[in-house]
Image (spheres, rainbow, N blue to C red):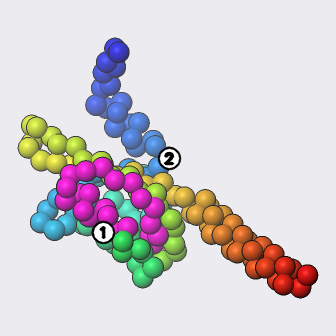
Amino acid sequence: MKRFNLRHEILLQLVESAQDGIVVAEKEGDDTILVYVNPAFERLTGYSADEILYQDCRFLQGEETNLDAVTVIRHAINDQAPVRTVLKNYRKDGSVFWNELSVTPFYDEVEQITYYIGIQKDVTTQVELALELDVARETIQQLTEQLATQS
């Protein structure tokens, strides 16, 4: 396979133009701090880069964020392993969105540090439709059981 070599400027423009949120983070103690966010991440979350750079991503979590999903992400980061999960996050204005988060570690041999690229995809519509489908199936099951007992 022929290796295609992108200039750094072109690669950055591609990332900046992506439709999904893209962040780069690094470990600092127990925190995983953001060192880069693309414009799509800013649009998705409502936070500007100036507000959130050099902070841990916990600011997206809220009351109903699944702590099991957060634990899976933390363990993967600590183990320097890739992970993908869906979790409920909160925008700056407090509104909810379902975030399909993919995190992949990358070890930079020059700086001798591991960076993590995170890709956030808003899957709110898909999750809400799946939840509605579950409710509809449950309702059908209950109605089927009621019909069976009436017969």
Q: Which residue: 48% across, 54% down?
A: 121
Q: Is residue 22 left or right of residue 129?
A: left
Residue behind mark 1? 71
| Callout 1 amino acid | Thr
Reply above or below: 138 against 46.
below
Is 149 a magenta residue? no
Q: Which residue: 51% across, 65% down?
A: 98
Q: Residues within 10 Å of mark 1 (few under 14, many from 20)?
A: few
- Measured as percent of width and height from the top left, residue 83 is found at 34, 53
Name the quadrant of the C terminus: bottom right
Reply above or below: 106 against 55.
above
Which region shows up in magenta? 69-93
Q: Which residue: 34% across, 19% down?
A: 4
Residue behind mark 2? 19
Q: Are marks 1 and 2 in contact (CB under 8 Å)?
A: no
Name the quadrant of the N terminus: top left
Observer-nearest residue: 68 or 143?
143
Name which quarter of the figure residue 107 lies in: top left
